[in-house]
Image: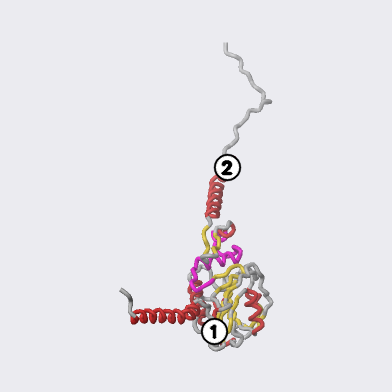
């Protein structure tokens, strides 16, 4: 049966409509797969192993001139971040989640490590930084921790110098009057070396604890934690952002504990065996031997 002119015309119209819809969808598809302008170039470039310039100067939340190196004393590592107080959401979520995670650690801010947040907004005032600090010290709620939290402000050149040193790439979105930046914390050794990055917004206390031990080169925490660091029990997995247990390290610890236990058990045994038993008495070969006459 031959198709009539009307059916041919309808089919042609349908094909034409499908083509038009497809052509209209192509730009939309391209836009959906295009990186948003606000996040373009916003990233963290690894600077692991680099040393920070500890003489860099800031204003603290009391409007005092301070050096970055003022927070690197003794064996204490530093958790460093870049935020700003007028951030509409991301900074508050980042700092809140980290503060709650730190509250679950045996380590304490101020006693075992320092927390430093540098504002990326050059217009931020020290009074605003002080108010932000009070929010998180109250949330952390440990006596004496106020001196371990530091919220710093600086001029544009200093901010740019520090962010470049850490590989922290951010940008100002002018029409929205906000900063686009990645959520990340930097673990810094007591000497100012970048040791580890903690990305994202989900912070597991065990990961933070092991990162602090690593940053402090095993000089904080319990003897078991320090031994674990020394024997390389924990290895950081970049793909998961977590520390994994290394079997060989655990075997080394088990072997060390076994050897120590045997030593503790055997030393007293050897000591008492050597000094507790009197030596057998040996007759003097020069002693005069008295002979008795035999009885008849």
254 vs 84: above or below:
above
* Residue matched to label 1: 85
Nearer to me, 183 or 139: 183
Where residue 270 is drawn, which disc sits there? 2
Instruction: Report if residue 290 is visible in the image.
Output: yes
Q: Which quadrant is home to the C terminus?
A: top right
Dot 2 surroundings within 10 Å: few (below 14), some, or many (20 or more)? Answer: few
Is residue 206 magenta-colored? yes
Where residue 39 is drawn, which disc sits there? none
**First in residue order: circle 1 vs circle 2:** 1
Which range of residues does the magenta coloring cover?
199-226
The extreme top residue here reads: 296
Quarter of the figure with residue 15: bottom left
Residue 44: % across, % down: 58, 73
Nearer to me, 164 or 27: 27
Element at label 1: loop
The extreme front residue here reads: 2
Quarter of the figure with residue 54: bottom right
Element at label 2: helix
Is residue 183 magenta-colored? no
Dot 1 surroundings within 10 Å: few (below 14), some, or many (20 or more)? Answer: many
The residue under the point 63% across, 28% down is 283
Nearer to me, 16 or 8: 8
Q: Which quadrant is home to the N terminus?
A: bottom left
Residue 225: % across, % down: 54, 61
């Amino acid at each position: 049966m031959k198709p009539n002119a009307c059916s041919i015309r309808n089919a042609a119209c349908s094909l034409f409509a499908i083509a038009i819809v497809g052509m209209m969808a192509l730009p939309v598809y391209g836009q959906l797969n295009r990186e948003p302008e606000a996040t373009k170039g916003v990233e963290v470039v690894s600077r692991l192993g680099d040393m920070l310039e500890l003489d860099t100067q800031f204003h603290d939340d009391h409007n005092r001139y301070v050096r970055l190196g003022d927070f690197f004393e003794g064996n204490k590592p530093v958790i460093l971040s870049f935020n700003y107080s007028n951030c509409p959401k991301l900074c508050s979520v980042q700092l809140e989640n980290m503060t709650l995670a730190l509250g679950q650690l045996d380590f304490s801010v101020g006693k075992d490590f320092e927390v430093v947040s540098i504002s990326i907004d050059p217009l931020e005032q020290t009074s605003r930084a002080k108010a932000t600090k009070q929010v998180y010290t109250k949330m952390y709620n440990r006596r004496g921790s106020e001196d371990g939290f530091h919220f710093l402000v600086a001029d544009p050149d200093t901010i740019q110098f520090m962010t470049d040193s850490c590989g922290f790439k951010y940008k100002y979105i002018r029409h929205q009057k906000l900063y686009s930046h990645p959520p990340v914390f930097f673990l810094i050794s007591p000497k100012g070396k970048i040791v580890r990055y903690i990305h994202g917004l989900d912070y597991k206390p065990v990961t933070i604890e092991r990162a602090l031990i690593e940053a402090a080169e095993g000089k904080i925490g319990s003897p078991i934690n320090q031994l674990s660091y020394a024997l390389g029990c924990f290895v950081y997995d970049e793909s998961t952002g977590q520390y994994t247990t290394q079997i060989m390290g655990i075997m080394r610890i088990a072997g060390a504990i076994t050897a120590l236990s045997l030593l503790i058990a055997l030393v007293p045994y050897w000591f008492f065996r050597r000094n507790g038993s009197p030596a057998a008495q040996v007759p003097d070969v020069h002693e005069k031997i008295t002979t008795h006459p035999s009885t008849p």
